[in-house]
């Protein structure tokens, strides 16, 4: 008689944590300030302020915004601050940087608010593959949140995981 095949992964106490499940919903926009610079490089204050004043900021309602300058122009801090004052009533979040930087900020907020008390002293695997953009920083934020409380941490899939951390024996 053939021996029954057991799914040891399904029977394990291993808990899979998928960062993709915590992906903040909402459209992401990369706003390039170079479009408002003279020849893409020179910030003329009056022209910059006029363009900001005339721009339709309502189009950014409930969106996440990354402010950037795609040229090598030196953009003073006040320019980003000015744009943010116009975006603040509409956008969900405004950061300086690229879209990956924006995702990192969003995930930092999500992970900071997570209640992970149910993972205390349990083996956890952080799922590696995702269909949505999960920045590398998000994994580091999660490690910082989980390591002090879990029994062990792994990365990948249950069938082929990479061990990262094991709680010292007490």
Image (tube, helix red, strand yellow):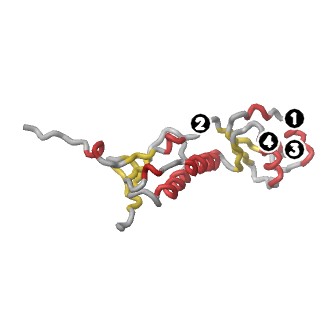
Residue placed farthest to the left in the image? 1
Query: Is residue 44 toward the left or the right of residue 83 in the image?
Result: right
Mark 1 or 4: in front is 1
Which is more N-terminal, label 4 or label 1?
4
Mark 2 or 1: in front is 2
User: Which class describes the residues within 10 Å of circle 3: few (<14), some (14-19), or many (20+)?
Assistant: some
**Disc 1 and disc 3: Cα gap in Å?**
10 Å
Tell me the number on the disc at residue 54. Answer: 1
Label 1 secondary element? helix
Q: Which residue is mark 2?
A: 25
Tell me the number on the disc at residue 35. Answer: 4
Q: Residue at x 55, y 49 (%)?
A: 111
User: Which class describes the residues within 10 Å of circle 4: few (<14), some (14-19), or many (20+)?
Assistant: some
Which is more N-terminal, label 2 or label 3?
2
Mark 1 or 3: in front is 1
Label 4 secondary element? helix
| Whole-percent x, y for residue 34 in the image | 78, 45
Which is more N-terminal, label 1 or label 2?
2
Tell me the number on the disc at residue 48. Answer: 3
- Are circles 2 and 4 on residues that touch, CB within 8 Å? no
Q: Is residue 62 shown above or below 127?
A: above
Q: Quadrant of residue 28?
A: top right
Dividing the image into 4 quarters, which one contains the C terminus? Answer: bottom left
């Amino acid at each position: 008689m053939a021996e029954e095949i057991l799914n040891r992964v399904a029977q394990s106490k291993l808990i899979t944590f998928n960062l993709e499940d915590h992906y903040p919903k909402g459209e992401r926009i990369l706003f390039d300030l170079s479009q408002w610079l003279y020849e893409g490089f020179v910030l003329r204050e009056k022209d910059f302020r006029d363009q900001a004043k005339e721009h339709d900021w309502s189009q950014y309602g409930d969106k996440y915004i990354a402010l950037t300058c795609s040229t090598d122009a030196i953009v003073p801090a006040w320019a980003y601050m000015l744009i943010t004052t116009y975006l603040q009533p509409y956008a969900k979040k405004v950061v300086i940087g690229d879209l990956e930087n924006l995702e990192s900020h969003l995930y930092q907020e999500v992970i900071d608010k997570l209640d992970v008390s149910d993972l205390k002293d349990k083996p956890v695997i952080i799922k590696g593959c995702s269909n949505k953009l999960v920045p590398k920083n998000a994994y580091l934020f999660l490690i910082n949140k989980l390591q002090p409380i879990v029994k062990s941490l792994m990365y990948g899939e249950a069938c082929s995981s990479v061990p990262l951390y094991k709680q010292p024996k007490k």
